[in-house]
Image: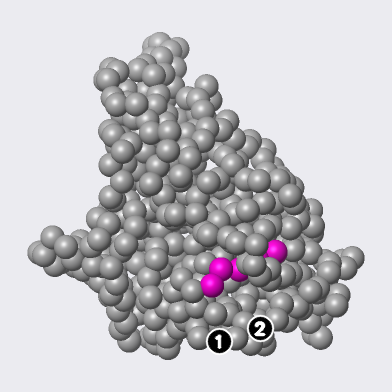
Amino acid sequence: VIAWLGCTAALQPPAERRLPEIEPALDVDPDPGRVEVHLEAIVTELSWGGGPATEAWAYRDAYGGSTSIPGPLLQVEEGDELEVHLHNALPMSSTLHLHGVALPNDMDGSEITQMVVRPGEDHHHTFVVTHPGTFWYHPHFEVADQMARGLYGPGLSRGDTDLHETADRTLVLVDALVDDEGLPVYDVEPELWRVGRQGDLVLINGAPAGEDLVLRATPRERWRIVNAAHSRYFGLSLEDHELRVVGGDAGPVRTPWSTQLLVVAPGDRYELIVQPEPGSRAVLWSLPVDRGFGVPPGEALPLLTVVGPDAQVSLPALPRSRAGMPRVPLSPSTATRVLSLAEGTAPDGEPLFSIDGVPWPFSNPVPVREGEVEVWEVHNCTEGHQPFHLHGLFFDVLDLDGLSPLHDSREDVADIPPGGMLRMAVPYEVPGQWMFHTHLLDLASHGMMAVIDVGDHAPAPSVPLTCAPGGQTAR
Ligand code: C2O
Ligand code: CU
């Protein structure tokens, strides 16, 4: 009898976990052209990937009622007015930064564009969403710590209808640093944060990654990928499939492209089309990415299994070109600005990072003239990859070490390998003070951050620095 029971157990299909969907935040405004959501940053209890329940910080949808990590999905139609309220119920000040959606400077939510929101205080953002795309939100105060505790969430703006997708999903990828008992580690030692903290627990929409995590696909899937991890790069690869890249940080790419391996840097977003065959099963892998700093790239990691649809349907062909944000105009007189990202040591012996030789917050905003375009030549002097991020102004990537990119799209995050030089065309389209930094959050929090001040200014001359051994810069 015992043997027979064992046999039945073996014949049962393996237990399957469904990939969770992220609940949209409740829109409390009945006006179809306005979306009003109320988020509360709260202290809650949560188990990280099945470990013991422990304190975490999360966004709660104050009217919808749900609390989740990632936080609720901000969902709008292109052209809608979006109003996001933040109530800070944390024991620490915070802000809400909207990463990757065009907005006026005073809505950016960084610690330099507004007063921080103190415990018990409220703040709100209102602006019109002028383009389709995938964005996200996170605090911009003590960001490395607050994001580790669980504060981040996705957003999307719909408006592009040329893909005829049968499902539109948001996949938020993160990793968590947990100890042997499965408890999260929020305080990390300098030797770990110096290279960007990375944890072994990978979560997709809050669920632990694994082959038993199942995404039941429709014939034409649109996936919005958000890498909300502190430092982990995901090397996405789907067995027997090509990934069709149709969107980048600023919405539609002008020229969609296909790839077997898509490396997604921290802070980065991609929109993909995946069309699984009926009856197929394919594992979505995260292949090892060597991000430098001596961090072991690790093993290939199964993220989830994609199960094909029951039947095929006939769908219009995918577009070969898309209406993305226009290319940034360049002319022979476009000026070049040289920037360098570097590492070093503070007087107290702790690691310290800098842009143009000055660690944040000791640098002054760099004045540039509104309406102009400049080419930024960003040198990565450090020994690891840097996901370079610029707030508020979407740029075109021109080339990386002289090679032109596959992306034909406006971006707000672009990866620069160690020793690499990225050239990008930056349009000074929106006035105000815009932060730029590495999206390795620990490194940004320890100095690798600066500000560009777009206005009616005479542009500051650019400081030509060269990379010196040990990741530093020299004049
Ligand atoms: Cu996600 Cu200052 O950025
Ligand atoms: Cu940002």
Could you tell me the amino acid type at mark 1?
His
Q: Residues within 10 Å of mark 2 (few under 14, many from 20)?
A: few
Element at label 2: loop
Identify residue for label 1.
457
Q: Residue 24 at x, y = what percent? A: 26, 55
Decide: marks 2, 1 in contact (CB < 8 A)? Answer: yes
Q: Residue furthest left?
A: 30
Residue ID for mark 2: 460
Label 1 crowd bin: few (<14), some (14–19), many (20+), radius 10 Å: few
Counting from the top left corner in percent of width and height, residue 287 is at: 62, 37
Q: Nearer the viewer, residue 461 or 200?
A: 461
Residue 180 lies within the magenta run: no
> How far apart in space, not on screen, are marks 2 and 1 (Cα)?
8 Å
What secondary structure prevails in the magenta region?
Answer: strand
Q: Quadrant of residue 96?
A: bottom left
Residue toward you, 396 or 76: 396
Instruction: Examine the rendering and report whether any part of residue 284 can be seen.
Output: no
Tag 2: residue type? Answer: Ala
Q: Please provide the residue range marked out in magenta.
A: 372-377
Q: Residue at x 28, y 68 (%)?
A: 128
Give the camera-side residue of 96 and 191. Answer: 96
Please name the residue shown 38% across and 46% down the image: 323
Question: In the figure, 457 relative to 154: above or below?
Answer: below
The answer to whether residue 345 of the structure is visible from this angle is yes
Viewport quadrant of the N terminus = top left
Q: Residue at 60% x, 54% y: name it.
A: 397
Please name whichever residue, 13 or 256, is drawn nearer the observer in this view of the structure. 256
Judged left or right of residue 74, residue 408 is: right
